[in-house]
Image (spheres, grey):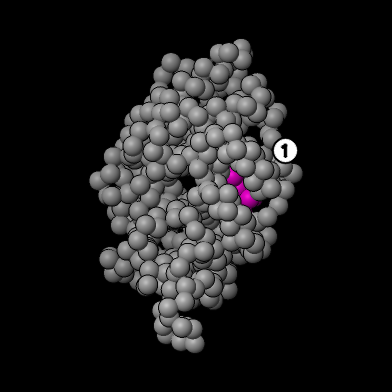
Amino acid sequence: MKPTRLAAAAFAAVALSVPLTLVASAAPVVDDRSPGHAKKDTLRRAAPKGFHIGTAVAGGGHHESQPYPDPFTSDREYRRVLAAEFSSVSAENQMKWEYIHPERDRYNFGMADRIVRFAKQNRQVVRGHTLLWHSQNPAWLEEGDFTADELRSILRDHIKRVVGRYRGDIQQWDVANEIFTETGELRTSENIWIRELGPGIIADAFRWAHEADPKAKLFFNDYGVEGVNAKSDAYLALIAQLRAQRVPVHGFSAQAHLSTRYGFPGDLQANLERFAALGLETAITELDVRMDLPESGVPTDAQLAQQADYYNRTLTACLNVDGCDSFTIWGFTDKYSWVPVFFEGEGAATVMWEDFSRKPAYSALRSTLASASRR
Ligand code: 9MR
């Protein structure tokens, strides 16, 4: 448990020298829509030292079918907020196979290079996403009819090339993404690597990534693993086994695409703690909280308060776990969120409105970060 001490006023009854576990308090329902909010009053400034508050960098994927230009390179206000608010950035799509390796003999590093450069200029760390996945693979790969030997060298070369290019610049890599089903089976039929090369390829991917960048922390990443369940059990067992074999696995992360339809995963902290007990780092990598929108399209105050509470409880769980030092939201403005594109009738999932004004969820995150900082 992290020795986090909260403000005296909030916990007058508790001796201040005692390390406290943060308890998610009711999220303050502050709707900070005023355009001129203090520019220095940001998430990254509020965060405790060494704790990275991150966001996905919008581009690629669903954005390409939307009626706006590339957000990261074209939207000045977006870039300003991205730099001001966050100390970690993740490539939302720009490091995925279909984007960065569109043809067998051609890589497209342009946008990933720009993200890494932006991060350096703004003193941000970078999360790399992702190297071994069943989705967003290019057709040349999925339909290529390669032999097992060819596939193995294709994966190895890709990992060496991509991880090697950003050696020293990536704090955490999602090496393997979404490899298990809800029932804890490996996605053998969907995942080309596991299907064609067997589960041993997972360990090889971690080994190759480690050789290419020995300093990067290497993660398993998935959704639906916030709580203790068959899927997170499967990760725990696999990671324990790989670590016993000295495979360089350093972290386990929960994406946390939450929905108010399904309730909050109240055992999130307990779940992260069992991974921490294996000696792993943990992280929240893709948090958003979607909701069913009323007919007006505008969430009610009660919905916004509930959303703020989910954001706050997710952050609190992470702050309370030793080695959970990276907390990333999957985009910070509704202007570019993937949610309405994928879930009809749902939306408003991020912490800022389309004009970048702040929702209660934003204020909840900032005040919890600030409380955790006061030692
Ligand atoms: O946000 C991403 C969106 O732009 C893409 O169109 C989509 C395609 O699958 O992927 C989204 O990001 C996913 C992430 O890479 C892995 N976890 C789930 C995320 C939301 O689908």
Count of all numbered marks drawn on residues in the image: 1
Considering every residue shown, the one lying at the far left of the view is: 121
Q: Which residue is mark 1?
A: 185
**Residue at (38, 50) in percent of width and height:** 88
- Point out residue 95 in the picture as x, y percentages from the top left corner: 44, 34
User: Quick one: label 1, few (<14), some, or many (20+) residues within 10 Å?
Assistant: few
Label 1 is placed on what type of residue? Glu
- Looking at the image, which is closer to me, 10 or 28? 10
**Horizontal placement of 215 versus 292: left or right?**
left
In the image, is residue 9 above or below residue 185?
below
Could you say where residue 63 lies in the image, as x and y percent from the top left? 46, 41
Quadrant of the rendered image containing residue 363: bottom left
Q: Measuring 50% from the left and 43% from the top, which residue is drawn there?
A: 250
Residue situated in front as seen by the camera: 233 or 136: 233
Q: Nearer the viewer, residue 185 or 256?
A: 185
Q: Element under label 1?
A: loop
Q: Residue furthest bottom?
A: 13
Residue 104 sits above or below residue 322 on the image: above
Q: Is residue 134 visible?
A: yes
| Magenta stretch bounds | 222-226
Q: Is residue 237 left or right of residue 127?
A: right
Residue for point 32% across, 63% down: 45
Residue under the image location 49 percent in, 58 percent down: 322
The location of residue 300, given as percent across then percent down, is 56, 71
| Residue 99 in view in this figure | no
Determine whether 194 is above or below 40 in the image: above
Overall secondary structure of the magenta section: loop
Q: Is residue 223 magenta?
A: yes
Residue 136, quarter of picture: top right
Asked if the stretch drawn in magenta spans residue 92, the answer is no
**Left or right relative to 191: residue 2:** left
